[in-house]
Amino acid sequence: MTRWTRHILVLFAAVLVSCGGDVFVDSKDTPKIDQYVYTVSDGLELLRVSNGNIYVELGESIRFGIGVSVNGTFNLTDSLQNYFSSMLWNIDGEFFNIDKVRYTFQSSGIKKGYLETVDWFGDTLRNEFSIYVNTPSQVSITFPYDGYNQAEPDNEEGLPLRWNVSGIDSWEKAQCEVFVSKDRDSVWSSSLGKINCQDEVLLEGTLAEDSAASLYWAVAARIESENGQIYDDSSEITHFWTKRFGQDSSVIKIPLVYEDFRDGGPIRTKIKFVDSKGDTLQVLENTLAATTLKAMVLPQSGLKILFEEEIRREYAYPELTVDVPSRSVIELDTVRFKDKIAPQLEPIKSQFGLTEGVFFYLYDDGAGTGQSRIGVFLNGDSLKYSYVEPYLQFYPQCDRVCKLKIQGDDYSKNELPNHYWLIYNRQDHYEIVGPISEENP
């Protein structure tokens, strides 16, 4: 899920902790040097810091740098070589002996680090710090899951709503809010209230009154880090069904789509319901390229659902087997009819007059094809043509023998076979020979 982060900007370099080994020399002329660690994200946003701790995201790149104050005056501009003879960083067990370090955190958890320097007076200065690397959060629904259809319409014991929030680190706390509605579009405005993310909600009362009802629900989580950073996350919207009232029969809903169907021609779908004994229980018919069909059936095991397209026969879908509990609404996954067969292509005859034009039969009994999806080439040169289903017509100019290549596909991207034809000029007519495979000429 998408995470929204509320960043708190710091107006100056984020001070972690001043050096524990400040230099004190009796001479009044010796300057007092303090060192500090500051951190900047790759986006040039200064990080929020609390009591020597840095809070970053998993995979985030951070630049660590050294700040110096001399007699209380903070300085980022002077060369560090004016103050230190050596510098050493330790970040999560890796060592660097440079003044600025860019580090990417590849795992979550609390990482340790320190900066150790030696000034020109021979004193060692050391800063220790912790980096809190955030675990990405995720909110997921566990029960009732999407498509669940066994909720009692009037259950005195109530229906438990359960979810899981992962990615809450030890320095974070989370609060969840549960949303339920009979209208998907109004889910996020239908709150049941806020609750501890580790608890569950019991949905009580009448969920449906006279027929099976579909309810939609989701969970939102707000996660707050101890440094004040806030993350908002949420689950997907999930829906479930109550059982039907007063009768044992169940309803099967079948969303149906013909993929890549564009030419607007007729279709006719037949859907047969066959029991485990092989008897046909009922047949549904459909003439729409996108619809949802409904069938009422008695409870049973091993119900087969068979699909057949009677007009656009290149469209097909395998059979389904469904177990049907009593008083339920079963919503199947979308049945997507697909055309996986290339268009048919062949000349309507083998000989044509020199001026009458050449006609090919080009037909796709599925998604269909069109003028813009076809190319005709004679000896490699593009040739003008016209296509009015199912005929492709063009006028070749061939003196002796020419290679004819027709390329294209249908709206489901099934390409024409990689074939070509030879056109022979027989003085008074053209003769077409082929098809000849390009792979095995």
Image: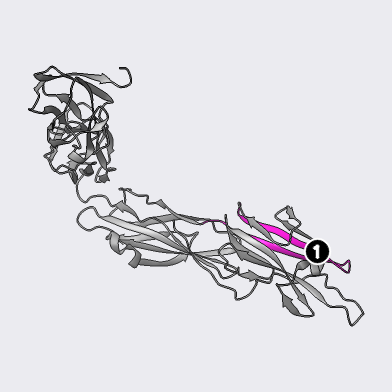
* Residue in view at x 27 percent, y 61 percent: 183
Q: In the picture, which quadrant includes the C terminus? A: top left
Q: Is residue 394 magenta?
A: no
Q: Provide the major secondary structure of the magenta segment.
A: strand
Q: Residues within 10 Å of mark 1 (few under 14, many from 20)?
A: many
Considering only vertical position in the picture, is 37 above or below 249?
Answer: below
Q: Is residue 145 visible?
A: yes
| Residue 319 seen in the figure | no
Q: How is the image coloured?
A: one colour
Q: Is-magenta flag for residue 108?
A: yes
Residue that carries the numbered disc 1 in the rendered image: 117
Question: What is the quadrant of residue 190 in the picture?
Answer: bottom left
- Decide: is 341 above or below 172: above
In-image side of 215 versus 232 (left or right)? left
Residue 280 pos. (x, y %)? 16, 30
Q: Residue at x 76, y 75 (%)?
A: 69
| Left or right of 77 in this view: 162 | left
Identity, as a three-letter code, of the amino acid under mark 1: Thr
Tell me the quadrant of the picture where the N terminus can be found.
Answer: bottom left
> Residue 105 lies in what quarter of the image?
bottom right
Left or right of 313? Residue 436 is right
Q: Is residue 368 above or below residue 25?
A: above
The residue range painted magenta reads 107-136
Query: Could you say which is closer to the camera, residue 320 or residue 208?
Result: 320
Q: Secondary structure at mark 1?
A: strand
